[in-house]
Image (cartoon, grey):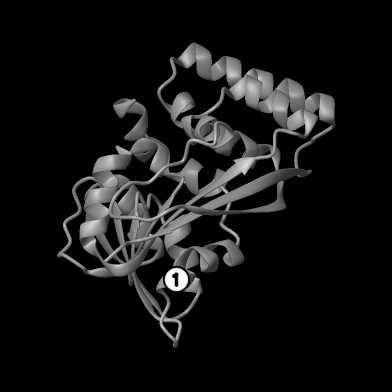
Amino acid sequence: MTERATSFGAETESYEKGRPEYPAEAVRWLLEPALGGDGAARVVDIGAGTGKLTRALLGLGGTTVAAVDPDAQMLATLQARTPEVEAIVGTAESLPLADAAADAATLGQAWHWVDPVAASAEIGRALRPGGVLGLIWNVRDERVDWVHRLSGIMHGSPAEQMIADDAVAVFAPFGPLEERRWEWARAMTRAELHAMAASRSYVITAPDDEKRRIARGMDELFDELGLGEGGTLEMPYVTAAYRAVRGS
């Protein structure tokens, strides 16, 4: 699991190209309990990767964001696109931040990689009382037949399993989790779909023959669906968001 959790730096460009953005409404919902009357908040984005969620947080306006990730290569990509953001090497279980340094902490596509008890305690230390922990995932909607078939070719992820099992959990000093979901779709080309697959930890760490099998299976599916070069498919997504407030 550790190898897969820290594998993404090998595919930073695929991650940027293939992974979807986060709906602004969902990102704002994550932070609502911590926002001041002027909409301002100090946010630490943990497991920030290339900055997908970081940029969405900045887009809300009024937020200042520090990005934390264990992979310096991912952070370098983030800083190249978002130079105004402070980028810090660290983990959810060991944050290089002072006590009560932030109003909110967010993790996009990342909580399934952490020790939830240790991470809850450490993030709680770095947040002020009343601060909010926000967790968010974009998950392909496998109720659609071709998406279900695509997932079979690529293999599932720990995140998808955690959400399907309703197993997302946070611990002290945080209170109960609230959950909301948003359904939407993204038009994707064949190249973007291949980049999405290439950015997944299972594929990054797979042997070359397995990578070739996955790429071949995807192309066979896309040919069947009539997805030619320059064409797009509507990829249906469910954004699952969770938030919990730090106790006093």
- Residue 176 appears left or right of 155: left
Which residue shows up at 50% across the image and 11% down it?
209
Residue 9 placement (x, y as % from top left) = 35, 40
Near-viewer residue (120 or 194): 120
**Quadrant location of residue 124?**
bottom left
Near-viewer residue (44 or 77): 44
Q: According to the image, label 1 marks what residue?
A: 33
Question: Which residue sits furthest top?
Answer: 209
Which residue shows up at 37% across the image and 57% down it?
78
Above or below — where is 247 with respect to 206? Answer: below
Which residue shows up at 40% across the image and 81% down it?
40
Above or below — where is 85 with respect to 95? Answer: below
- Residue 45 appears left or right of 194: left
- Amino acid type, residue under disc 1 in the picture: Pro
Q: Quadrant of the N terminus?
A: top left
Which residue shows up at 67% across the image and 46% down it?
237
Residue 89 placement (x, y as % from top left) = 22, 51
- Residue 33 appears left or right of 117: right
Does the rendering let one see residue 70? no
- Secondary structure beneath dot 1 equals helix
